Amino acid sequence: MLNMRPNDPHSAEDRARTMVAVILSLAILLAYYVFYAKPRSDAQRRQTEQAQLEKQKEAPGNAASSPSGEAQRAVISRSAALKESARVLISGDRIEGSIALKGARFDDIRLIEHYADLAKTEKVALLSPSNTEHGYYVDNGWLSTESGIALPNENSVWTLSTRGAEKVTSGGKPVILEWDNGHGLKFETEISLDKDFLFDIVQRVRNTGKDAAPLNAYHSASRNNLPTDFAGFYALHEGPIGFLDGKTVDPQYKSLMNTKDYELPDRTGWLGISDKYWLVTMFPNPEQRFNVSITGKNFGEAGRQHYQADIVNAATTVKPGETFEEKSRLYAGAKDLKAIQKYQEQYGYKNFEVTFDFGIYYIITKPFYYLLAFLISISGNVGLGMLLMTIIVRAMLFPVASKSFRSMAKMRIVGPMMKELQEQYKDDKVKLQQEIYDLYKKYDVNPFSGCLPVFIQIPVFFALYKVILIAVELRHAPFWGWVPDLSAPDPTTIFNLFGMLPFNPPFSFTLGAWPCIYCFTMILQKNISPPLPDPAQEKMQTYFPYFFSLMMAQFPSSLVIYYSWSNLLGVFQQYYILKKVGGHDTSLLRGHADRRKPGKKDKHKDKHKGKNDDDVPPSSAGTDKNVSHS
C-alpha cells in the first residue's frame, strides 16, 4: 500500500515546495502574458476588421445603423483635412490646435508637452478631422423630435462673432460662434479654456419665430479605427468609459464590434473615451438627465471601424421669444492626475479619477504613483526618481524581508536537529510535532515567514507594473546609457552583442542588456540565499533567473531596471542579515559551503572535525545565543 506522507507546515521541505509553487504560479502568469495574451492582442485588430468586413458583405447595414456618411468619406492626410474648413485657433498653456467653423467641431487638438516620436518632430495629435485614418473628434449640437426644424449639423458653417475673442486662449475671453437657421432659431456656442485641459461650452438657442421648438442638446465623441498606440492588454482599459448613475461603464472596443451596442436611458454623470495616456471626456451639468449610446460599427471596403459615445439630454421646449442655454464641459488632454482630481472636487464630477485606471491593486498602485511623481519632481530626473523609489520600497519591505531571511538562516541551523527528531520519532507523529514545535520555540523560528515576502511581492509587482504602464511621466523618458524610452522594452539585443556587431537580427524577439543585468542580479541573489532542502527543487530554481529574464525582456525597461536595482539592494540586505544571524561564518550560513570543492583549508579542518560536524555547523553552538535573541 502506498504510504502518503501528509503535508507538514513545519517541514522545511514542504515550505520550500509552497514557495516554489507560488513562484511557478507567478511565472505562469507572466508567461501567459508574454507568449499568449500579448501576441493575441496584437492580432485582435486584424481579426476584428476581417470578421466585421465579412459580416458587412453578408448583411449590408441600413442607414439607421451605420456611421454618419461623413465617416465614410475618402481618407486624406491630416494636413489636407485641416485646410478644408475655416478655423478658430486654440492657443492654450498645455494644448493647441483649432476648431472647425464647419460643424463647430473640436477636431484639431495637439498636446504641447508631449511628442509623437522620440525625435520630437511633431506633437501628439489628440483630435483629428473625421476624414483622416485615425479621425477623432467631438461634436456639440442640437436634435429635435420634430422633423421640420432646421438644425445645425456637420456641414453647417458657423460664423465667428465679433462679440467674443478671435481665438481660444487659457483663461481668456470666450469665443462665440453663431448660426441662424433662417426660420426663427438662432444658435450660439460659447467656448473658453482653462489653464489645463478643460473647455467650458455654453450652447444657446433663441427662438424669434412663431412656433415652439422641442430640442435636445447632445454631445458626441467619435473615432475612426483603433488608436495608433493601442496596447490591447487586459490590465489596461482603452475605450469608452463613463460613470453613470453611480456605476462605471467601460466596454472594450472588441466587445462593441462583436456584440450589441450600449443604450442606457435616463442617466446622470459623465462619458468619454480613454486611451493609454490620453483622455477625452464630456461633462453635462451634474444634475442633467440624459440618454447614453455607445456604439461600434464597421464601414468601408478596407474594414475601417467607427466608435462613438453619445449623450442626448432630456428634451426642452423653447417657446417663441425665449432663450435657452445648456452648459457643459469637455476634457481633452493627457491623463494628468492632479488636473483630474481638481476637476473632480471642484465641479463634483464623481469618480472621474477612475479614468486613471489604477487597477485592482488600487490601494497600492495609487500611493506608488504619488511617490514616483513626487520623487521625479524633487530629483528633476525620471530615472533617478525611479531608483530612489526602489530604495524606499525596499526599505518599506525590510522588516518583512529581514524576518524571512533570519528565519531561513535559523532553519539552516536547526535543519540537522529536525532530521534527528524525525528519525527518532518516526513512529510517533504526535510526539514528533510537539518536539518540532519546542525546537522552533527554543530557536525562535517561524516556519512560515519565508513565504511571506513572496506573497507580499506579488501585489507589489503588479502594482509597480501598473504604475509604469499608466504613468505618462515615463513615456519617452530616457535613462542613462542606451535606453531612450523607459516605457518601452530595452532596444538592444544580445544577438548582435548589444549593437557592437553591424547587423540587426532577422527576428522580432530580443534580449536586451538590462534583462541580462537582471539575470545576473538574480543569480547573485540566489548564490547568497540558503538552498532548498529538496535537490530537485533546488535544481529547478537554478533555471529561474534565465526564465524570468526572457520574460522580462518584453516588459518596459523601467520595470526591468527597477527589479535589477532592487535585486542588487536585496543582495546587500541579505548579506547583512545573514551575517548578523550567523556571526562571522557567513559562507556557511548562506548554505553554499557544502557545495564548494574542498581546498587545502577544508582538508586541514577535516582533521579536526568531530563525528557530528557534518550535520551541525561548527558555529551553531556559538550561534545559539545569537539566534535566540535575534
Image (tube, helix red, strand yellow):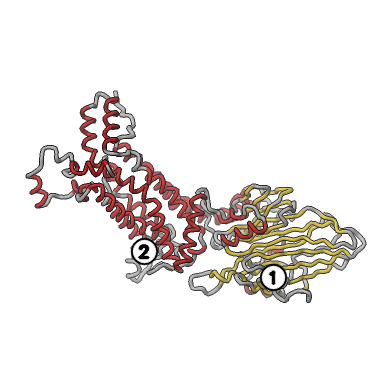
Q: Place residue 86 in its image quadrant.
A: bottom right
Q: Is residue 404 above or below residue 318?
A: above
Please give left or right for residue 144 compared with residue 138 in the image: right
Please give left or right for residue 598 compared with residue 309 in the image: left
Q: Quadrant of the N terminus?
A: top left
**Near-viewer residue (39 or 34):** 34
Q: Is residue 208 visible?
A: yes
Number of labelled discs?
2
CA–CA distance in space, label 1 to label 2:
45 Å
Q: Which residue, given by chain and number where applicable, does mark 1 sit on?
A: 99
Q: Is residue 301 visible?
A: no
Marks 1 and 2: which is nearer the front? 1
Q: Is residue 25 above or below residue 112?
A: above
Q: Is residue 597 above or below residue 183?
A: above
Q: Is residue 483 above or below residue 51?
A: below
Mark 2 is surrounded, within 10 Å at the Cα level, by few (under 14), some (14 to 19) or many (20 or more) other residues, namely: many
Assign a secondary structure to mark 2: loop
Residue at the right extreme, as displayed = 210
Q: Residue at x 50, y 58 (%)?
A: 370
Q: Are marks 1 and 2 in contact (CB under 8 Å)?
A: no
Q: Place residue 409 in its image quadrant.
A: top left
* Amino acid type assigned to the residue bearing label 1 in the image: Ile
Dot placed on the residue nearer the N-terminal end, 1 or 2: 1
* Amino acid type assigned to the residue bearing label 2 in the image: Thr
Q: Which residue, given by chain and number where applicable, does mark 2 sit on?
A: 493
Find residue 557 and report its horizontal and vertical position in percent. 42, 61
**Near-viewer residue (335 or 62):** 335
